[in-house]
Amino acid sequence: MARRIGVLALQGDFAKHAAMLTRLGATALEIRRERQLAGCDALILPGGESTTLTKLLDSYGFYEPIRDFARRRPVMGTCAGAILAAREVDDPRVRPLNLIDISARRNAYGRQVDSFIAEVAAPCLPPPPRFRAIFIRAPQIVRAGPETEVLIFLGPDPVMVRQENILALTFHPELTEDFRIHEYFLAMTRG
Ligand code: GLN
C-alpha cells in the first residue's frame, strides 16, 4: 500500500515536497485543515516563513492536533518547518510545536549569505557519502538535546537531527534531484 504523507499546505514550498513524494510512489496529501491529519501515515512541515506559519497554525487550530499526531507518527520539518518543530526559538514571534529537543536561531547564517549550497557528509544515507544541501535563509540549530541524534553536520552545526519519529533539517532536500532524505523519511513510516 502506498504511504499517505501529509504536507502542511498553509504557506511555503509544500508543492515541491508533494512532487518529490509522488515521484517516490507515495500519496501526497496537501493538508489545510486539521481533520485531514487522520488520513496520514506521516507529516511534512515545509519551508516558508515561521512567523507567518505561527499565525496560520494558530488560526486554523493546528497546534494540539499536530502535537498529538507527532506522538504516534513520523514528522519531518525542513527549514521553517524545523523551526516550528523545535522546542525553543530565539524569536518570540514564533511559537514552536516542541516536537524535538532542539533550539533554533532564525536566519542565523547572515544576510550576505542568505542562500548557499554545501556538500555535507551524510553517513546516515545510502551512497554516495555526501549530500548537496541547499540552505535558504536557514536557521541554525544552536542546541540539540541529549535524546537527539545528529545525522548531518555543517561544520560544527547540526543540520539534520532526529529524535525517535521526528526529523528536523535546516536545508531543503525537496529542491534537489536527490531523493535519499525523503526515502529515509518514508522508511521511518514503515517502522
Ligand atoms: N527564514 C525562514 C524563517 O525563519 C525560513 C526560511 C526557509 O524556510 N527557507 O522562518
Image (tube, rainbow, N blue to C red):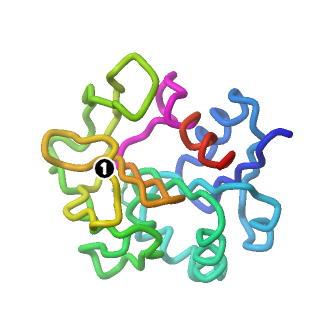
* Magenta stretch bounds: 170-182
Disc 1 is placed on an element classified as: strand
Q: Which quadrant of the figure has residue 116? A: top left
Please report the residue visible at 14 percent of the width from the left and 39 percent of the height from the top. Answer: 155
Q: Is residue 53 magenta?
A: no
Q: Amino acid at mark 1?
A: Val
Please report the residue visible at 23 percent of the width from the left and 55 percent of the height from the top. Answer: 140
| Vertical arrangement, residue 72 with respect to residue 23, above or below | below
Q: Residue furthest top?
A: 128
Q: Which quadrant of the figure has residue 185? A: top right
Q: Residue 134's spot in the image, x, y percent?
A: 35, 34
Q: Residue furthest right?
A: 1
Determine whether, in the image, residue 156 is placed left or right of residue 172: left
Determine whether, in the image, residue 108 is placed left or right of residue 60: left
Within-10-Å neighbours for mark 1: few <14, some 14–19, many 20+: some
Determine whether, in the image, residue 115 is placed left or right of residue 59: left
Q: Is residue 179 magenta?
A: yes
The residue identified by callout 1 is: 150
Please report the residue visible at 15 percent of the width from the left and 50 percent of the height from the top. Answer: 110
